[in-house]
Amino acid sequence: MASITPSQAVQNILKELPSLVAVAVVETETGMPLAHHSNTPAFDAETAAAYNTEVVKQKLKAIQALKLDQAIQDILLTLTDQLHLLKLSPTGDKFIYLAVNSRDTNLAMARQILKGQTAALN
């Protein structure tokens, strides 16, 4: 599979999920968004990326503390009318954060799209 940049990943996700709320490719260590887009002006994808970095870090710490021989497939947060998905790249140095309206998006499809994009991230 060809390698893609964070900006390309965001554009690819926008093509496949044009009605998304927001998407960001985030550096796991720092929480810095490498690329992001929001379809909702009031939704700050950069702030969401920073806070969701803490979710990823804490889950990784919990896995380590429990001595689990496991890797995160994805993290799903279900809100009243939104789904928030976090998917780590194969190396774990980046993750894609995706927020969608639950009534407009098929969860299985969103997971597949994220899987394909994170697998190709460089």
Image: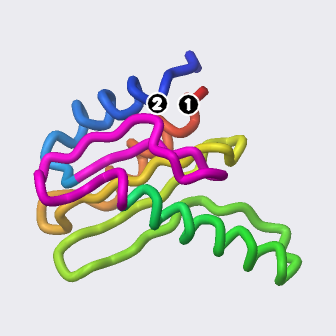
Task: Inspect the image, locate mark 2, and give the three-letter code of the amino acid beneath it.
Answer: Pro
Residue 96 x, y percent position in the rendering:
46, 47
How far apart, in angstroms, are the residues tagged by discs 1 and 2?
7 Å
Q: Residue at x 72, y 61 (%)?
A: 71
Viewer-closest of 5 and 115: 5
Q: Which residues are magenta?
A: 22-47
Question: Which of the 4 image quarters holds residue 8?
Answer: top left
**Numbered mark located on residue 78 in the image:** none
Question: Which of the 4 image quarters holds residue 61?
Answer: bottom right
* In the image, residue 34 above or below residue 50: above
Q: Is residue 45 magenta?
A: yes
Viewer-closest of 58 and 100: 58
Residue 88 x, y percent position in the rendering:
58, 51
Q: Secondary structure at mark 2?
A: helix
Q: Residue at x 25, y 56 (%)?
A: 44
Provide the residue designation for mark 2. Answer: 6
Task: Inspect the image, locate mark 1, and give the three-letter code of the amino acid beneath it.
Answer: Leu
User: Mark 2 and mark 1 in contact (Cβ < 8 Å)?
Assistant: yes
Provide the residue designation for mark 1. Answer: 121
- Label 2 crowd (10 A; few <14 / some 14-19 / many >=20): many
Q: Residue at x 41, y 61 (%)?
A: 85
Q: Is residue 98 magenta?
A: no
* In the image, residue 104 above or below residue 12: below
Residue 32 vs residue 69: left or right?
A: left
